[in-house]
Amino acid sequence: MPSEFELIGRYFERPAPTADLGVGDDAALLPVSAGTQLVVSTDMLVEGTHFLADTDPRLLGWKTVAVSVSDLAAMAARPRWATLAVSLPAADETWLAAFAAGVFDCCESFGLELVGGDTTRGPRNLCATVFGEVPRGQAVTRAAARPGDDIWVSGQPGRAGLALAHLMDGVALCDRLREECLAALHQPRPRLALGLALRGVASAMLDVSDGLLGDLRHILECSGTGAIVEAAALPLAALAASGADAALCRRCLLAGGDDYELLFAAPPRHRGAIEALSARLGLPLHRIGELTRERERLMLREADGTLAAPAAYGYDHFA
Amino acid sequence: MPSEFELIGRYFERPAPTADLGVGDDAALLPVSAGTQLVVSTDMLVEGTHFLADTDPRLLGWKTVAVSVSDLAAMAARPRWATLAVSLPAADETWLAAFAAGVFDCCESFGLELVGGDTTRGPRNLCATVFGEVPRGQAVTRAAARPGDDIWVSGQPGRAGLALAHLMDGVALCDRLREECLAALHQPRPRLALGLALRGVASAMLDVSDGLLGDLRHILECSGTGAIVEAAALPLAALAASGADAALCRRCLLAGGDDYELLFAAPPRHRGAIEALSARLGLPLHRIGELTRERERLMLREADGTLAAPAAYGYDHFA
């Protein structure tokens, strides 16, 4: 049986050209660029909570890194380095090789270098910390949105939720959508190019990890605004084409987690720029509502004009 | 039942005066000082592997941060910030309040600010990532030791191992030593002042987390040297005073993990400075051997002059 150090050497040590010192010492040494702020995010994925025991380890490696890259994208930060702590029940080398391949795939796709971590025995638990850089003062936080700003969401939120409904509850989905939804769940693509392009455009931004409305509420809390979301503006058609129940599709879109789309606010004067950006990136950007002055009041306006508080917001690990 | 976000707000949000943005957004924003390198280390503690289910949560909070601070000390880096990812089976607020108190105790003791993290449900798993700074070029790595350098170790390695032998196997220890050993195991004191003072003095350094000889081997591998450790120079007397079996004491000293003492190499010309430092810090520093030219050959010399390879090196999670 290989030792912990052999496992690290075999699967997790690769050159980290821009780090001053990478995997293999007590700590990594990183040359943070002058004039930037370091941007740091940590996410922990737990078997049974975030993924099933039989999840393809290569996709899981990808996702372990991707969910944190998504946080950097949501700050408009450029990814630089990552550390990875892994707890595993046994030194299963087939699993490890596939998992590591997925980790490095994702790192390479988004410009990250793995510079350190920890490997230990225990229930399967994966914890990535990612380090990005942003020119000083250009990060997009949750706190600077203003009443009157538009609310936008990227891509197709709700697909990961539908995939979960399919896997857990046997909800039937047409072939094409099923593949798309499973890919959204298992191999999320952080919206990095979008996040970087929204510097100076978005007034507030976050990634949808726990549910669109629940995450929108964080912007309202941090920025001290309210919001009205327009049901008619939600990108429901593509989900409905899956053949799944319309109410389930809507619930997945508004309160399903794990999509890693970007949700952002921007002043109306940027509408043209955002539409041009959508065309340039080949990524739909949906204007789904507006921020209001009514502090932390989140309302849904139906197509018939009725206003009501949402029935569900999102996922809460301890609710 | 409080939500995940209420728990974070209640137990893990405190002011982080030097961070540009702390807990509560997608990522933290940190102003790394000009002229420094960022020093990053991650450690994961798992219930059943690193601690027992009934461990005092306040001590566990301390230790979760302390083991990573120890890595910064071993690089001669000054602690600045930390993130903490926590997986818990339930939102037990009594446990969380005590755990968080221990976390912040340790952070305050060593100048760390908690700036982010993750909270999720699952088997108990605690993962801290710490961020330190070191003036560019002054970090002490594992790679620059040279044949002829002395080998030093701080304090009293072996106490945590004896405490484990007491807890797991019922080994009897005299009252005074038992308290001391349990404190070493449950509330390790990272040797930060020592680590910082060894800039420009130590040629290589690491903290003893997996066993003195096993960790020494990492210096040999990275620096391309061998070593002879002198049995007669080992600080065994204090352990033997516990009343435990002499062979067990020696095994705990040489191969017991979890002590977080600093093990370092330094050229003989620094002996006087190191002894003065020991007096200034009130911390014993033991010169226990010498590095040799015989690449990665680690030998123990007994009091009678016989040389032999060690019987045990340390702890390996997957061995």
Image: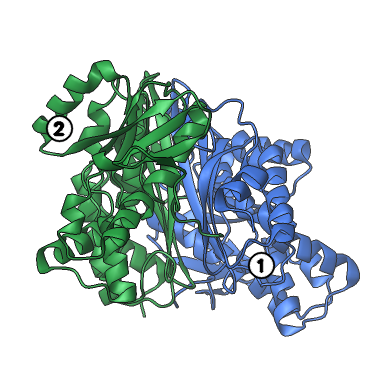
Chain colours: A blue, B green
Q: Chain of mark 2?
A: B
Residue B273 is left or right of residue A253, and the answer is left
Residue A242 is left or right of residue B86, and the answer is right
Residue B42 percent coordinates (x, y): 44, 47
Residue B125 percent coordinates (x, y): 44, 65
Residue drawn at 77 percent across, 83 percent down: A170
Mark 2 surroundings: few (<14), some (14-19) or many (≥20) residues within 10 A: some
Quarter of the figure with the C terminus of chain A: bottom left
Residue drawn at 65 percent across, 60 percent down: A259
Q: CA distance from mark 2 to mark 1?
A: 63 Å
Q: Nearer the viewer, residue B67 or B169?
A: B169
Residue lying furthest top = B269
Image quadrant in which you'd find residue B250: bottom left
Q: Secondary structure at mark 2?
A: helix
- Report the amino acid beneath label 2: Ser
- Report the amino acid beneath label 1: Leu
Q: What residue does disc 1 label?
A: A253
Residue A44 percent coordinates (x, y): 52, 59
Q: Which mark is residue B278?
A: 2
Q: Chain of mark 1?
A: A
Q: Nearer the viewer, residue B126 or A316?
A: B126
Residue B168 percent coordinates (x, y): 34, 74
